[in-house]
Amino acid sequence: MPRPDRARGLFIAFEGGDGAGKSTQAQLLAASLQAQGHRVLRTREPGGTPIGEKLRSLVLDHGQGEIDARSEALIFAASRAAHAVQVLRPALDAGEIVVTDRYIDSSVAYQGAGRRLGTERIRELNDWATDGLWPDLTVLLDVTPEQGRRRRTTGQAAEDRLESEPDDFHARIRQAFLDRADASPGRYLVLDAAGAAEDLAVAVLQRVEQLL
């Protein structure tokens, strides 16, 4: 398993299935750390850079034409490569706390397991794309496919290309995330996404404070 990057800053990634509440928890953590006086960069994947946002639209929006599994994996890796070089490493080198909504584990889970391309192959691809930049802590918000879909479709919200995949696809993704966490327990904080947002935020902040 890769070891976390030891830059001067601190790198936190939020992972989990669609509807797990990653964006909410990333926002809450960033706000708490900023209130303590820390410099925090909050970002997301795919995206985080101008080219990354264009690629995000290409792979997540409906109506872009057929995208095969390998092309999808390479698009995500390309977006992540730009993100690592243009945003993540400069912020970490400047001593900032970086909080990202998704990172490499999402590709390992979605394309490696969900698309059945092989989790190790996708891990190696993204390790190369980021030049070995891994989080110091990954917060995994564990959600079942059924829970995730209920959350995503509340209020008749539209699902993107990946969200609209069947539950067995999302079940493979969930298991891949859990397998990653089981393999490197020291680098993960696994929380039940069904918990109250406030309680989850407290648990996340306590773990991050141990790293500061």
Image: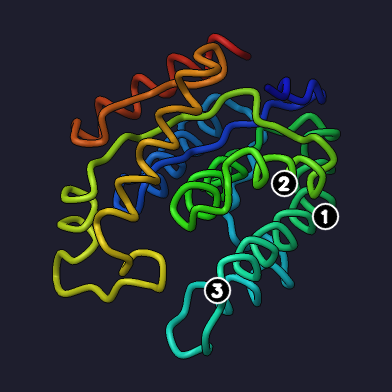
Q: Which residue is mark 2?
A: 126
Q: Quarter-wise, where is residue 165 in the image?
A: bottom left
The 10 Å Cα crowd at callout 1, few under 14, some 14 to 19, many 20 or more, is: few
Q: On the rendered structure, is 58 left or right of 200?
A: right
The 10 Å Cα crowd at callout 3, few under 14, some 14 to 19, many 20 or more, is: many
Q: Which residue occupies 47% across, 15% down?
A: 207
Q: Quadrant of the C terminus?
A: top right
Q: On the rendered structure, is 11 left or right of 201?
A: right
The three-letter code of the residue at mark 1 reads Gln
Q: Secondary structure at mark 1?
A: helix
Question: Image height check: is 99 above or below 57?
Answer: above
Image x and y of residue 196, in percent: 19, 33
Image x and y of residue 92, in percent: 78, 34
Q: Which residue occupies 35% across, 35% down?
A: 141
The three-letter code of the residue at mark 2 reads Asn
Image x and y of residue 112, in percent: 54, 48
Q: Nearer the viewer, mark 1 or mark 3?
A: 3
Q: Which residue is mark 3?
A: 59
Question: Image height check: is 176 above or below 74?
Answer: above
Q: Secondary structure at mark 2?
A: helix
Do the residues bearing badges 1 and 3 touch, measured as CB atoms within 8 Å?
no
Q: Which residue is mark 1?
A: 86
The three-letter code of the residue at mark 3 reads Val
The one of 106 and 122 positioned closer to us in this rendering: 122
Alpha carbon distance from label 2 to label 1: 16 Å
Q: Quadrant of the N terminus?
A: top right
Q: Which residue occupies 47% across, 23% down?
A: 181
Q: Which residue occupies 56% across, 44% down?
A: 108
Marks 3 and 2, the one that precedes in the sequence: 3
